[in-house]
Image (cartoon, rainbow, N blue to C red):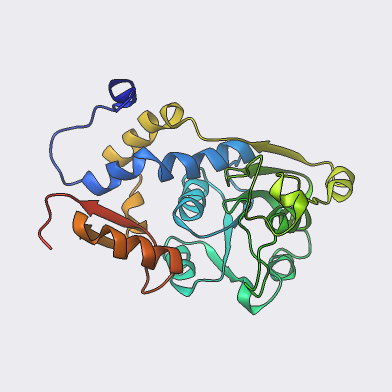
Amino acid sequence: MPFADFNCLKLPQGDELETGFILLADIFPTGYHGCELAEVSPGESVAVYGAGPVGLMAAYSALLRGAATVFVVDRVPERLEKAREIGAVPIGFSKGDPVPQIMDRTGGEGTDKGIDAVGYQAQAHDASHEEPASVLNSLVDTVRPTGRLGVPGRYVPSDPGGPDEHAKRGQLLVSIGRMFEKGRRMGTGRCNVKRYNRQLRGLIIAGRARPSFVVSHELPLDQAPQAYEKFDKRVEGYTKVVLHPALAA
């Protein structure tokens, strides 16, 4: 594996925190990265769009950083229940546009910060088709003037499966005029895992963070194909799967 030694992170002996440490490889640092891009600070309100593994980690990280209120937007009941369990406010967009739902809960002001944990495969509210810019535009309307957006959700320079010719070239119709009018700043980009994994490891060791709450299933390696399929279809409560090569089926 290229650069395997470079990417290694030293862990304490024992396996009681193993599942939490596994999440340091990707989703915990990426969720935290979303908060860093948005500059989430104590006492703020935050809207996280997407309650997949990264979105849940972003919401959890926002709470770790002292956010007063965290809204989590998704359409999958099991994911929204996970958000509720950690103290976030679930917003089901299958019940209607999430923007007015959040506005109603913030006295019409919107949130201080917003995080896009969905990316270019965002869907319409009725989940009937892809709308690649829908989350970005919802965040433009959700976050108050002068607020900041963090975008760890992936956007690509080309998408052969995009819904139109512009989307196929990575060109999206974003409400830039509205964003400019509200004096927004936005941070984007892939997560540099090594920037965060040591400090997040420290939080886990100290008992300050328990990211393993997101794991719904721990399965043997030979069940990986079925697990991927169920996770992709958002069925049977599959929010995050950990595969154990040595685990008996």
Q: Quadrant of the C terminus?
A: bottom left
Q: Is residue 38 left or right of residue 65?
A: right
Q: Is residue 48 above or below residue 207?
A: below
Give the x, y percent position of residue 170.
70, 44
Residue at the (51%, 35%) spot, across then down: 191
Residue at the (63%, 44%) spot, across then down: 155
Answer with the quarter of the image where residue 137 lies. Answer: bottom right
Q: Is residue 149 left or right of residue 89?
A: right
Answer with the quarter of the image where residue 229 lies. Answer: bottom left
Residue 221 seen anywhere in this rendered image of the structure: yes
Residue at the (27%, 58%) spot, across then down: 224
Q: Is residue 175 left or right of residue 103?
A: right
Residue 207 seen anywhere in this rendered image of the structure: no
Q: Quadrant of the N terminus?
A: top left
Q: Out of 18 and 176, give the one closest to the viewer.
A: 176
Q: Out of 152 and 156, give the one closest to the viewer.
A: 156
Q: Is residue 213 above or below residue 34?
A: below
Q: Tell which residue pokes out farthest to the bottom in this image.
A: 95
Q: Out of 230 and 61, give the one closest to the viewer.
A: 230
Q: Is residue 164 left or right of residue 193?
A: right
Residue at the (62%, 49%) spot, across then down: 115
Give the x, y percent position of residue 60.
46, 51
Give the x, y percent position of residue 9.
29, 28
